[in-house]
Image (tube, rainbow, N blue to C red):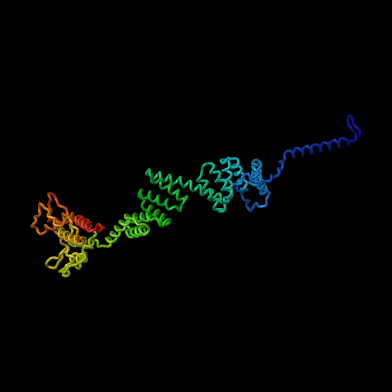
């Protein structure tokens, strides 16, 4: 080889030198580029997944068979192998290449959970669900992140959404059951504490929350109804008692509570049915008493307005007294006597004609000598005493062998002598407690009888005869 010192005249040697230099530069560049390019890490072989509870996100149909789907698959394999760094790199690469690819965000969320960083994981699951609301894996992962962040109610909602999309998630269903039970216990405890403290609104809200978690629990509706009833919300209480009864038709107590609310609202027929239904399930003396009372009210409601006005009357008529006796003491009127009662000429068109005839036939109240009953005549205390004494005689006749306290009574009145025609009846009525004396042991024979006085006397007679207490309303 010839060497040119101080330059070569033919130029060939210089050209060869430049080519060699370029080759060296290209080689160096390739070495540098090769050194800077990411190395492909071979996929590990996963025999036992590091996180068996993690749910692999599905690949959306639009991305099936795409390079980003392959990257996602590689990333999940690294995650299952426990190589979190490689998994995070692959998931991040998928997002950089295709930002709309939601499974990669879900994958990053799972990486966050694997690193026990729920706070960092949650935003990834949220973003994944913004892009794909039906991502079951993201919903489950989000639920787990929320649990770790002590947000059980939000976690429960996320798990339920996942179950709605995939009912085969047995472990998630069990977790939902546990969370529901725990939350229900807390809600019930809060509701009961608020109710005991008298915080009705707070208690109602707590019961509503508990019911949302367990809508088929009749006792929750029953307890809620009790709070609403105490707070004066009768309509809401009735609705919840009915819901409780529909969930448990054998709950006699709840059905009786429905009867009480209906009775208070004026629905007497509805109340009677509820009480009857309750008693058909379980015997209860209190409910039986209520049923008797509403049946009596129902019967009274069908009576003439004149009868229902008696309790407010400042003075009653003979028709009023006959109606009170005929309706409330009917069992004492059995067995009639012969007489002129059928000849009474002034009762046919009277509202109380039926009961006037009954008391006349029984000899409890007599027509006058002119064959008139005079139903509009005002009743005085002597009139009431005579009728009461005759009824007391009938009570005594029904209990042979038992001496009654009023038999043969000879009381002293300051204004009624023992020779007065009404004295025996007055003495018997007062001795039996059916009537009371006035100031200074006066009987006040000529005083008129008010509706309240008459009802009190009839009530005492009913009690002595073992009959239900009277009512005009």
Residue that sits furthest to the bottom in the current view: 343
Residue extending farthest front: 401
Up-down relation of residue 7 to residue 30 (above or below):
above
Q: Position of residue 388 (x, y in %)?
A: 17, 59
The quadrant the N terminus occupies is top right
Left or right of 436 on screen, residue 45: right
Quarter of the image containing the C terminus? bottom left
Q: Nearer the viewer, residue 308 or 210?
A: 210
x and y percent of residue 148 in the render? 54, 42
Report the label total.
0
Q: Quadrant of residue 14?
A: top right
Residue at (61, 49) in percent of width and height? 57
x, y percentage for residue 376? 17, 62
Q: Residue furthest right?
A: 2
* Residue that extends furthest to the top in the rendered view of this protein: 6
Q: Is residue 40 left or right of residue 287?
A: right
Q: Is residue 95 visible?
A: no
Judging depth in this view, the residue of 395 and 190 nearest the camera is: 395
Quarter of the rendering containing residue 310: bottom left
Q: Residue 105, image x and y in percent? A: 61, 45
Can residue 422 be seen in this snapshot?
A: yes
The residue sitting at 10% across, 59% down in the picture is 421
The answer to whether residue 442 is left or right of residue 279 is left
């Amino acid at each position: 080889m010839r060497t040119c010192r101080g330059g070569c005249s033919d130029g060939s040697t210089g050209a060869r030198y430049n080519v060699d230099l370029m080759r060296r530069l290209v080689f160096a560049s390739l070495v540098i580029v090769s050194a800077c390019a990411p190395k492909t890490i071979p996929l590990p072989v996963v025999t036992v997944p590091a996180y068996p509870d993690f749910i692999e996100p599905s690949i959306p149909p639009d991305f099936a068979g795409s390079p980003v789907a392959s990257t996602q698959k590689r990333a999940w394999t690294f995650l299952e192998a426990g190589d979190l760094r490689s998994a995070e790199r692959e998931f991040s690469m998928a997002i950089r290449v295709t930002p709309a690819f939601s499974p990669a965000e879900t994958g990053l969320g799972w990486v966050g959970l694997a690193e026990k960083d729920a706070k960092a994981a949650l935003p990834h699951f949220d973003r994944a669900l913004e892009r794909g609301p039906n991502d079951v894996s993201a919903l489950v992962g989000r639920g787990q992140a929320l649990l770790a962040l002590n947000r059980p109610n939000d976690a429960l909602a996320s798990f339920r959404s996942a179950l709605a999309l995939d009912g085969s998630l047995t472990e998630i269903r069990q977790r939902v059951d546990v969370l529901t039970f725990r939350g229900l216990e807390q809600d019930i405890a809060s509701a009961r504490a608020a109710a005991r403290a008298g915080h009705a609104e707070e208690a109602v809200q707590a019961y509503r929350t508990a019911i949302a978690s367990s809508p088929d629990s009749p006792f929750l509706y029953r307890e809620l109804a009790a709070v609403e009833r105490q707070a004066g919300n009768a309509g809401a209480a009735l609705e919840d008692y009915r819901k409780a009864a529909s969930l448990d038709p054998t709950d006699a107590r709840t059905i009786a509570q429905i009867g009480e609310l209906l009775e208070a609202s004026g629905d007497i027929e509805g109340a009677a049915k509820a009480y009857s239904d309750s008693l058909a399930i379980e015997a209860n003396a209190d409910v039986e008493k209520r049923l008797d009372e509403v049946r009596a009210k129902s019967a009274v409601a069908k009576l003439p307005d004149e009868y229902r006005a008696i309790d407010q009357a400042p003075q009653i008529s003979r028709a009023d007294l006959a109606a009170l006796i005929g309706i409330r003491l009917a069992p004492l009127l059995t067995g009639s006597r012969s007489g002129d009662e059928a000849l009474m000429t002034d009762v046919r068109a009277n509202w109380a004609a039926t009961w006037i005839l009954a008391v006349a036939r029984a000899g409890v109240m007599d027509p006058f000598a002119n064959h008139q009953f005079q139903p509009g005549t005002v009743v005085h205390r002597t009139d009431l005493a005579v009728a009461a004494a005759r009824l007391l005689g009938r009570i005594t006749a029904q209990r042979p062998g038992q001496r009654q306290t009023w038999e043969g009574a000879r009381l002293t009145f300051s204004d009624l002598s023992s020779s007065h025609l009404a004295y025996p009846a007055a003495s018997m009525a007062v001795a039996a407690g059916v009537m009371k004396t006035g100031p200074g042991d006066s009987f006040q024979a000529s005083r008129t009888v008010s509706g309240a006085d008459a009802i009190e006397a009839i009530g005492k007679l009913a009690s002595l005869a073992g009959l239900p207490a009277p009512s005009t309303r």
